[in-house]
Structures are given as C-alpha cells and as structure tokens.
Image (tube, grey):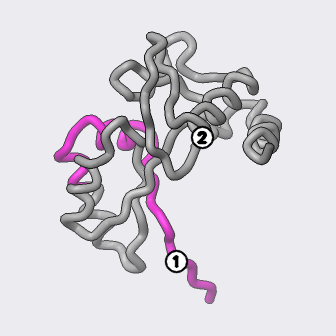
Amino acid sequence: MYCAQVGYVKPHGALYNDMMANEVIFRAVVEGVASLSGNPSLMILATTDNNRYQAIAAEKGVNLLFEAFADRAYTPEGKLAPRNQPGSVYHNPQQIIDQVTTLERHGYVVATDGSKLSLNADTVCVHGDNPESVATVKALSEALAS
C-alpha cells in the first residue's frame, strides 16, 4: 500500500471565494485543515493585508500559503473579478506573463480600475481550463527565469 502525505489544502471555486469573504467560513476551513494529520498548509488568496488571515490561522497552528492568480483580473478591493464580468479571465499569454512578472519584480498587480494592489504571494495559480494553458506556463517559466 502506498501512503502519501498532503502538503497543503486549496479550497476551490465558491468555497475559496466564500472563505475569503466570510470570516466564519474561513475559520471553519482553518479548523478543518487543523484537524488533518501531517500539519498541511492552507492555500488562500493573497490580499493587500494578509495579517488578519494569519492571526486566525495561527490560533489553530495552521500555516498559510498566499496565492496570486496569473490569469485573473483583480477588483480594486483586491478580490478576483467575477468570471461573468468581461475581461475577468485572461487568455492572452503576454497579459498573463506581464501580470506575474510585475508581481514578481514590483510586488503588485494592476486592478481593473488601473490601481496598483500590493500583494505578498508565495505561489501563483495558472488555470488549466483553457487551450493556451500549457504554452502559457512554459512561456511564463521562461520569462521568470530571465
């Protein structure tokens, strides 16, 4: 029998968005992760102020990994723009590369209103649900290496 250890938990979809918008839900997710063996981290959306989330997670001994999105637009409030909003999902590889390299080099992303959102992220998500994904990840890797 093969046994694997979970290194991190990343809620998905509505739960991900709901936990970032509602502290009660966030606390419930943190408690769920804290109950798992192996002490996995919890991956959440990087915000302009991660301190509030860190304090809640620290109460239960859960490490957080902060995630930025390569291929999603951000609202001026620092949330992901709703997918039903035009331009909320990026498909242009250069736009995706520009967002990630700006974040990596300057520590911010540009919101839908043109404002700069400072984000302290540990990791970047590139969605795989579009035909350009593999080529975009390759180009992004090359851009970050240069």
In the rendered view, tell whether residue 34 sits above or below residue 91: below
Tell me residue 65's x, y (percent): 44, 55
- Lateral position of residue 94 relative to residue 43, left or right: right
**Which residue is more in the foreground, 14 or 27?**
27
Residue 7 belongs to the span the image colors magenta: yes
Check disc 1 and report the residue beneath it.
5
Tell me residue 99's x, y (percent): 61, 29
Disc number lying in front (1 or 2): 2
At horizontal 56% and vertical 34% (from top left) the residue drawn is 106
Tell me residue 125's x, y (percent): 58, 43
Tell me where the magenta segment starts and ends, as one range. 1-28
At horizontal 43% and vertical 27% (from top left) the residue drawn is 117
In the rendered view, tell whether residue 78 sits above or below residue 36: above
Please, which residue is most extreme toward the bottom here? Answer: 1
- Lateral position of residue 26 relative to residue 95, left or right: left
Check disc 2 and report the residue beneath it.
104
Q: Residues within 10 Å of mark 2 (few under 14, many from 20)?
A: some
Secondary element at image label 1: loop
In which quadrant will I find the N terminus? bottom right
In which quadrant will I find the C terminus? top right
The amino acid on which the numbered mark 2 sits, given as a three-letter code, is Glu
